[in-house]
Image (tube, rainbow, N blue to C red):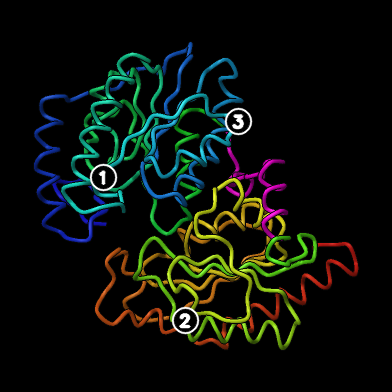
Amino acid sequence: MKRAFGRNYLFEKSHWAFILGLFDSLGYMLMPSRGRQLPEDVRKILVSRIDHLGDVLIASSILPYLKKRWPLAEIHFLAGRWAEEFLRMDPHVKRIVIYNSPRLNRNGGFLARLFDASLSLFSAVRILKRERYDLAIDLRAYSFNSIPVMYIGGAGYIVGFSTGGWGFLLNRRVPYRTGVHEIVHIVDVLKELGIDADEDGIKPRCRSTEAGLFEAGRLLEDLGVDPDGGFVLLHTGSGNPRKLWTPDRWQRVVDWLKVHHDAEVVLYDSVYGDGLKGCRRLPVRLSLESFMGVVERSSLFVGLDSFPAHLAASLGKPAVVVWCGINDPVQWRPIGSIVRIVKRDVECAPCRNERGCSTMECMDIDVEGVLNAIDDLMKYRKMVRTTGTST
């Protein structure tokens, strides 16, 4: 954490923390106190996580707790368009408000992202002004958060972290803890709202729809795969190209699964094309609902540190995750009943730099470590099928 003017900021560069600290200091002088009591009658709640899809999945774990505390309240979600399909499947979300942050949007060049952000910002502010939220919660602790959007949109009571700036616009600032999982930050937000939550009990919970399971079964049958046959799902892509593992290593994983476990391997890949042999390939343009159905039908997931790994873990699937040193596994590891993280320990990891470095030594991960983790989980799967227990 970087410090500036007595405040902590989550920046890689100290000069950005200084600039933001200077701006925030002016804000705290002009608006010395935004604090007031949380409204007793909360009828509309806005939850915001404008980050990538995996972050939104983790953030969705807060929704059942909010609904239990305020059962009559409508819950709306502010997110990027890339999370819309996922949020539409969550029964707690009444409405989705789109804001495509230029910093977090991975589609198009800078000017295109800036134009998209401007249009979605104006639209989001209009919606917020019309909805008049009693409570707004920003779950992003980093810069380019949505706190100013909530403030301009007239949200009545705003809760969030000041570590990404704009803390002077918050009615309640949640202390940020380092060295804990991201889910713990959500627990801290709930406690600030007077809601009891257990760090060990709260977790992302997803369920595939009947339509998604049906479509997944049809797709698998078209590929010549038994939908109930216990196949292994391999996911080799990532929204961040710095996290990619080399195709020759993935090919060794496929070959080993077939030789040592006689496993049917189903591949979802948007990076290497037809470069991997010996596996059944899912269509690249696959709806999220159908993909969730495929994950639900699989017996083991193997992939990179990305949204599908979080999805598989939340669906209770054994998962082996090839971990990139950009992220800290203590903070970001998928939460599930049985997850194996395979990483290379290097001094610079975690760097928390999304752009990575020139060498990406952290991704020079030994294939043997991945194969050993897969072997452990394949034995676990066999034990569960034989004994009927998952302990």
Residue 352 lies in what quarter of the image?
bottom left
Residue at the front extreme, as displayed:
222
In the drawing, what numbered circle is on residue 247? 2
| Front tag of 3 and 2 | 2
Please give the name of the residue rendered at 68% of the width and 82% of the height, measured from the top-left corner.
257
- Which numbered disc, 3 or 2, marks the residue that appears first in the sequence? 3
Label 1: few (<14), some or many (≥20) within 10 Å? Answer: many
- Which numbered disc, 1 or 2, marks the residue that appears first in the sequence? 1
User: Quarter holding the C terminus?
Assistant: bottom right
Residue 48 vs residue 288, the one in the foreground: 288
Q: Secondary structure at mark 2?
A: helix
Residue labelled with disc 1: 164
| Front tag of 1 and 3 | 3
| Side of 304 relative to 128 (left or right) | right
Label 2: few (<14), some or many (≥20) within 10 Å? Answer: some
In the drawing, what numbered circle is on residue 91? 3
Residue 6 vs residue 57, the one in the foreground: 57
Magenta highlight on residue 259: no
Residue 24 lies in what quarter of the image?
top left
Classify 93 as above or below 360: above
Q: CA distance from mark 3 to mark 2?
A: 39 Å
* Residue extent of the magenta highlight: 196-220
Question: What is the x, y in percent for residue 385?
Answer: 86, 67
Magenta highlight on residue 219: yes
- Which numbered disc, 1 or 3, marks the residue that appears first in the sequence? 3
Residue at the top extreme, as displayed:
41
| Side of 264 relative to 244 (left or right) | right
Question: What is the x, y in percent for residue 190?
Answer: 49, 34
Please give the name of the residue rendered at 74% of the width and 75% of the height, measured from the top-left corner.
378
Question: What is the x, y in percent for residue 112?
Answer: 20, 46
Question: What is the x, y in percent for residue 248?
Answer: 48, 86
Task: Give amino acid for label 1.
Answer: Gly
